[in-house]
Amino acid sequence: MSKTITILGIESSCDDTAAAIIQNGKILANVVANQSVHNLYGGVVPELASRAHQQNIIPVVDQALKRANVSKTELDAVAFTRGPGLMGSLLVGTSFAKAFALGLNIPLIEVNHMQGHILAHFIEDANEGKHPEFPFLCLTVSGGHTQIVLIKDFFDLKVIGETIDDAAGEAFDKAAKIMGLPYPGGPLIDKYAKEGNPHAFKFTKPNIQQLDFSFSGLKTNFMNFINNEVARNPSFIEEQRDNICASIQYTIIDILLTKLKKAVEQTGVKQIAIAGGVSANSGLRSALLNLEKELDWNVYIPKFEYCTDNAAMIAITGYYKFLKNDFSNQAIAPTARYAL
Ligand code: KG4
Ligand code: ZN
């Protein structure tokens, strides 16, 4: 008789406090507490993030257990994000996970957040029962990450391209901030871009080696452009809002997809997955679906709740590690930088 394996996943690497319960690969509860405290500041304030995690962690875990209708004594292991992320934020989730596992006398499983984003594709209901076949490429794009990863197996992941400065979500958020839009600006740029002309304004594209990305030059170019235009016409942003949003969005997507196409050419792999908050962008989604037809790719876009930071992705990775008996020692500590 096969045993039911029930795992609690904890995620606290940035500004979302999250807990999820997974049972044999199926998510029973996926709870996320967002932190609105950062909205005022135009970005995540690490010190405030750790304090909010401290307040949220117990209620979030409690909710996840209740929604899953699972008692803590039924848990077989606790999986948690060890890194990469903000140290103060990671410490809260790590300390909680260690204490909870110790108290329940069950194994502890450390998870790399970036591996979690990728393995989220294997959650049963992530993409209507479909999941990528090995080998596949994953474009992970969020406020903190921009990577292209070649995945040959659950535990054979190789970063083949990544940003040398800002992440793609940061590029969206910084552009929005320059336009005076609130944080996080990515969803607003997406919304206004729908009404604008993507070719109204041209911005610089970086000239970066191989499969790596850069977005800091684009930010400077965009800021100079806005400052010059506003100096000439103080109402420029209001009058051209939709065109500006459509043009900056077009440029960011173009930078991402140029490298993704190059990665497909270099590897010959046409199974393409996407992860991270920016994968909610409607322009990016439709551009990917067009490439799927045009270049004969298979594109996998998981449900939005599994794209943004969540604990379901930590729970599924914990589940695969549990199956390998890959457990962590109680002496484990979080790490802000953590290569795949
Ligand atoms: O994965 P996520 O929730 O958190 C991390 O950063 O790890 O991603 C958040 C990022 C933010 O930069 C946000 O602006 C961006 O994802 N984002 C979007 C959209 N929705 C979220 N960017 C562009 N278009 C969107 N629709
Ligand atoms: Zn993330």
Image (cartoon, grey):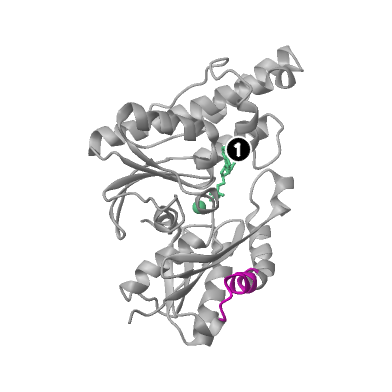
Residue 39 lies left or right of residue 261; in this view the side is right
Q: Quadrant of the N terminus?
A: bottom left
For residue 90, what is the image quadrant?
bottom right
Residue at image coords 49%, 80%: 75
Residue at image coords 72%, 32%: 180
Prevailing secondary structure of the magenta residues: helix
Q: Position of residue 332 (x, y in %)?
A: 44, 75
Residue at image coords 42%, 40%: 164
Is residue 166 in sight in this rendering? Answer: no
Q: Quadrant of the C terminus?
A: bottom left
Q: Secondary structure at mark 1?
A: helix
Residue 301 lies left or right of residue 14; in this view the side is left
Vertical position of residue 111 compared to residue 248: above or below: below
Residue extending furthest toward the right: 234
Q: Which residue is mark 1?
A: 186
Q: Nearer the viewer, residue 126 or 143?
A: 126
- Give the residues drawn in magenta, as a range: 60-71
In the rendered image, residue 61 lying in the magenta stretch gets the answer yes
Q: Position of residue 93 (x, y in %)?
A: 56, 69
Which amino acid type is marked by label 1?
Answer: Gly
